[in-house]
Image (cartoon, rainbow, N blue to C red):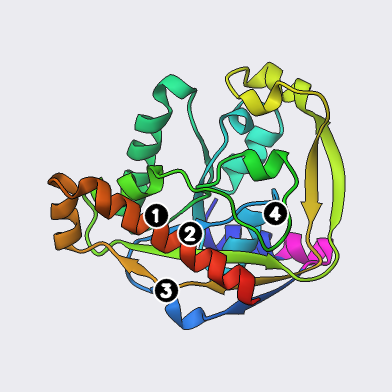
């Protein structure tokens, strides 16, 4: 699907749901550089929202089970998402796919909280712990002029929360995911009015890449992770 068509479908889909979105700090979005978008995550609508708000097709890494469930697989791949592989191949697959897209100067999106806030309902203005895979990707990938862009999704009006599918059913498609090994239903959050707040970009310079190769690697990974988490947390609290 072409980027323009993906953007049009995303905006039309949100309009059909009656979701209103408001973009803030738009001037922080790089226009020429490859961009790794890092965001908080509570709803299946998040990739659609970010694509519609930022005005560019975003290639999202999505959960392994989404590539295993019929119809879901066709839906997410039609929007340009790439489901991650099973755990034993997941890290390398993510790195290879994301690097190729960034080298093509595309926009790639990640949700460092993982599936936890999708399965366990979380409050609108909270953000969980970040996994650091995105930071390793940004610092290690051979991509020039890469920008890591933290973006906060902040719902500010009553949401609709529904039960979509039994978690045990999802475990049939992805038995490796411990979050699905429980009773209950996978919640689905539908936003009514939502702010998309763009944080301060983090530029991956040659100096930072050099530090990643040396003794300071752990520190620079922590710095990037904390920058993105801190920006998103601050934006959520202020909204």
What residue is at 52 percent from the left and 81 percent from the top?
A: 25
Instruction: Please tell me which residue is depicted at 39% across the width and 54% down the height of the picture.
Output: 225
Residue 106: % across, % down: 39, 57
Q: CA distance from mark 2 to mark 3?
A: 11 Å
Front of the two marks 2 and 3: 2
Check residue 127 in the rendering and tell me which mark sits there, or answer none. Answer: none
Question: Residue 45 bears which disc, if any?
Answer: 4
Judging by the rendered image, the residue that carries numbered circle 3 is 200
Residue of label 2: 229
In the rendered structure, are the residues bearing label 2 and label 1 in contact, judged by CB atoms less than 8 Å apart? yes
Q: Residues within 10 Å of mark 3 (few under 14, many from 20)?
A: some
Q: Based on the picture, tell me whether residue 16 belongs to the magenta stretch.
A: yes
Label 3 sits on a secondary structure element that is: loop
In the rendered structure, which disc, 1 or 4, sits on the residue that comes first in sequence? 4
Q: Which one is earlier in the sequence, the residue at label 4 or at label 2?
A: 4
Q: Residues within 10 Å of mark 2 (few under 14, many from 20)?
A: many
Q: Earlier in the sequence, mark 2 or mark 3?
A: 3
Q: Residue at x 38, y 32 (%)?
A: 91
Residue 45 in view of the camera: yes
Q: If you read the primary sequence from the N terminus, does the residue marked by circle 3 or circle 4 appear first? A: 4
Alpha carbon distance from label 3 to label 4: 23 Å
- Mark 4, Cα crowd under 10 Å, few <14 / some 14-19 / many 20+, is some
Q: Give the quadrant of the C terminus.
A: bottom right
Circle 1 SS class: helix
Write down the quadrant of residue 190 in the picture.
bottom right
Magenta extent: 12-19
Front-lying residue, 14 or 29: 29
């Amino acid at each position: 699907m072409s980027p323009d068509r993906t953007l049009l479908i995303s905006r039309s889909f949100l309009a059909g749901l009656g979701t209103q979105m408001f973009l803030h700090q738009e001037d922080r979005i790089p226009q020429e550089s490859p961009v790794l978008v890092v965001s908080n995550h509570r709803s299946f609508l998040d990739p659609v929202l970010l694509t519609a708000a930022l005005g560019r097709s975003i290639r999202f890494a999505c959960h392994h089970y989404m590539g295993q469930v019929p119809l879901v697989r066709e839906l997410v791949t039609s929007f340009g998402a790439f489901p991650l592989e099973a755990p034993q191949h997941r890290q390398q697959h993510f790195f290879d796919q994301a690097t190729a897209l960034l080298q093509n100067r595309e926009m790639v999106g990640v949700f460092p909280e993982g599936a936890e806030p999708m399965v366990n309902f979380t409050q609108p203005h909270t953000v969980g712990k970040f996994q650091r895979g995105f930071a390793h990707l940004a610092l290690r990938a051979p991509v020039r002029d890469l920008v890591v862009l933290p973006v906060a999704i902040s719902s500010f009006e009553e949401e609709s929360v529904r039960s979509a599918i039994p978690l045990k059913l999802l475990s049939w498609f992805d038995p490796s995911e411990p979050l699905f090994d429980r009773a209950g239903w996978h919640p689905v959050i539908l936003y009514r009015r939502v702010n998309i707040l763009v944080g301060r970009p983090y530029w991956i310079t040659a100096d930072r890449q050099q530090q990643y190769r040396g003794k300071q690697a752990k520190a620079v990974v922590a710095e990037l992770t904390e920058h993105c988490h801190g920006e998103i947390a601050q934006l959520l609290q202020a909204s």
